[in-house]
Image (cartoon, rainbow, N blue to C red):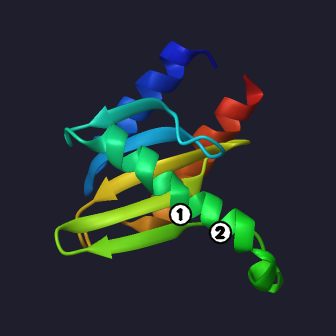
Amino acid sequence: MNTQQIAAELAAMATTPGVNACALVDSATGMVYLSAGGHPQIDSIAEAASDYWRLHQRSGVPFAGLGPLQAISMIHQDGVLSLMPCGKGIVMATLSGRMALDMGAWFQKVGKLGRLISQG
């Protein structure tokens, strides 16, 4: 899958009910590869939020018995910021409304995109 196809898929995902914006972020550096949606600060929020992912990676030993990390969600007064793995070394940062997103369905969409990214 090429970058244009990934960008198109991400833009389509950003129209999912409950999603305000989403971004694909390098999990090691915080660099935003692509973003989509209606939130003007998605890039800076996603970059900063990737620190949470790296923090877990650094201190994850106590959590090893729980299995691989599937998501980190931060609930704020005006929305939810979620991080999920999306391909090797990539995290999907998602801004959504509180209680507005079907997280199970979203996790499946993010996983599908991650598999497509990994193939290309």
- Is 86 drawn above or below residue 32 in the view shown? below
Q: Amino acid at mark 2?
A: His
Q: Position of residue 75 (x, y in %)?
A: 32, 75
Query: Which residue does the image show at 53% across and 57% down from the upper left?
Result: 51
Front-lying residue, 9 or 70: 70
Direction from residue 91 to residue 59 in the image, left or right: right
The residue lying at 43 percent from left, 33 percent from top is 10
**Label 2, residues with CA under 10 Å away: few <14, some 14-19, many ≥20:** some
Image quadrant holding the N terminus, namely top right
Q: Is residue 90 left or right of residue 38?
A: right
Residue at the disc numbered 2:
56
Residue 82 is drawn in which quadrant? bottom left
Q: Is residue 47 visible?
A: yes
Viewer-proximal residue among 96 and 26 = 26
- Please give left or right for residue 32 compared with residue 80 in the image: right
Counting from the top left corner in percent of width and height, residue 60 is at 74, 74
In the image, residue 16 sits, relative to residue 7, either above or below, namely: below
- Label pair 2/1, CB-CB below 8 angstroms: yes
| Residue 112 in the image, given as x and y percentages of width and height | 61, 44
Q: Residue at x 72, y 73 (%)?
A: 59
